[in-house]
Amino acid sequence: MKGVVAVSLLGTQLDFVGKRVDRWHRWRPNVSLVSQENLIINKLYLLHGSRSLRLAHNVAVDIETVSPETSVQLVEVNFDDPWDFGEVYAKLYDFCQTIEFDLDNQEYLFHITTGTHVAQICSYLLTESRQFPGRLVQTSPDPSNDNKSVGQLHTIDLDLSKYDQLAQRFDIARQQGESFLKGGIETKNLAFNRLISQVEKVAIRSSAPILLMGPTGAGKSQLADRIYQLKKQRNTLQGDLVVVNCATLKGENAMAALFGHTKGAFTGALQAREGFLKAANKGLLFLDEVGELGLEEQAMLLHAIENKKFYPVGSDQQSHSHFQLIAGTNRDLNACVADGSFREDLLARINLWTYHLPALRERREDIDANIDFELDKYSQEHGRRVRFNKEARVAYLKFAHSEQATWQGNFRDLGSSMIRLATLADTSRISTTDVTEEIARLKSDWQVHQPSKHSSCLISILSDEQIAHLDAFDRQQLEYVVTVCLQSPSMAAAGRVLFDVSRTQKATINDSSRLQKYLAKFGIKWRDIAACK
């Protein structure tokens, strides 16, 4: 049978003897520890400060009286500040290092009833980390025992793996968080599920900026909103969700909209405005299409993220706002840094947690579940339950999973498609005729947004995925630029045609450099175009 070795701190208040004739009628933690009928402690390390040496001796004498089997070893441990975690942990750790643990023959207990809360927490940490390879025990008074000095003993088991029910509750909470972030949709795409699993952890544990990247319609806004709702549920923030589409912030109004302005700061500023950053104080700020911000706004945003303060337009008084940032973009921000349209230091600051949301065509196995989600959403909003008949669903899914379905607008396309089908369906059932007409419409819409015939070289230069990620404006402009390049003998010649007006207004003309930077935004080099001639 193993011997028992215990470690305990002297309780300067609870272990105090007081009137010696009364001491056996009072509960004292360390005397109670050795008075338990079913526990024989062979050795007790009693830790005390130098000022409490007399009390420690008195307690040791009483311990030997009630438990002759217990050998008490007084150990002097002085804490300059008993509420300093670093000092208390270090000195208790050093004490543990002096013990020659014999786990084959001895069982070890750490008594955590006495000492400050800091000492008790440090005792827990030392035991949980196995620096002290034993169990935690706690004594307390026992109202049912006529002998008040004995009390009762509780053992604290730190092996959480034994608590299956507790572990299951943790798992359920995590799974509920992930399901919430996915809108309750049972997604099957492994990469997306792994992404959401990590986002759930980051949303709960971190307040650092999050960058959501992906094509338009991939669900960046919806995910940002769900992250906010999840953080709100878990009480990790108290403020509001403020959503800003940076593509709408242009010119001099962009700075005022973001950072606020004073009355009369500029023409039309009839009254002061707090701005989006201030409105997001203690909450979450979602900057969608962050790549559209101007360089000046980017610089001020970086300062606000790092310092939690900024100057409203027209004010010499700083405004403060503690917000978490989520930024969304469909652009390649690294390419934007390369062409000078996005600040490298800002990207480095918001790039700690970056997640690339895949396009719908990369998650075709999730189309089925998203169809049900969209139809349920329609039913809730319109009070009318609509479903496919069997043949219609098979026909729609066959098309949706095929290469013919390019899903250029991603989940927005799918959501719009379900709204049209549900609205036009008779008798609350979507028929094969409805599906046939909807497929024709989708194909027509996607054909309109396909690159025009004269962009065949553009198709050779960029992948289908890169082209699909281009906005209609960028695609049309890039097609024209490529056409001019194909018709020109050199980059300089193409630049003279493309910059025919602005070049005359520059002191130094460098058409080739300007064209090179423009093409670099799309990852295109002159030799790529030359190869198509």
Image: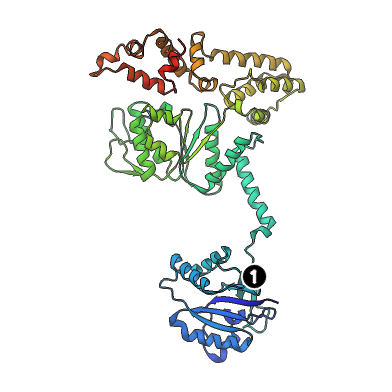
Q: Is 98 or 481 nearer to us in this picture?
A: 98
Q: Position of residue 221 (x, y in %)?
A: 52, 33
Q: Residue at x 61, y 77 (%)?
A: 5
Compared with 144, 311 (above or below) is above
Task: Sort mark 1 into few (<14), some (14-19) or many (20+) by Cα contacts within 10 Å.
Answer: few
Compared with 136, 306 (above or below) is above
Q: Amino acid at mark 1?
A: Thr
Quarter the N terminus occupies: bottom right
Q: Position of residue 275 (x, y in %)?
A: 38, 36
Q: Quadrant of residue 219?
A: top right
Q: Is 490 or 509 nearer to us in this picture?
A: 490
| Snapshot colouring | rainbow
Q: Residue at x 61, y 25 (%)?
A: 361
Q: Residue at x 44, y 65 (%)?
A: 86
Q: Quadrant of residue 446?
A: top right
Residue receiving disc 1: 155
Q: Residue at x 52, y 26 (%)?
A: 216
Q: Residue furthest left?
A: 507
Q: Quadrant of residue 247?
A: top left
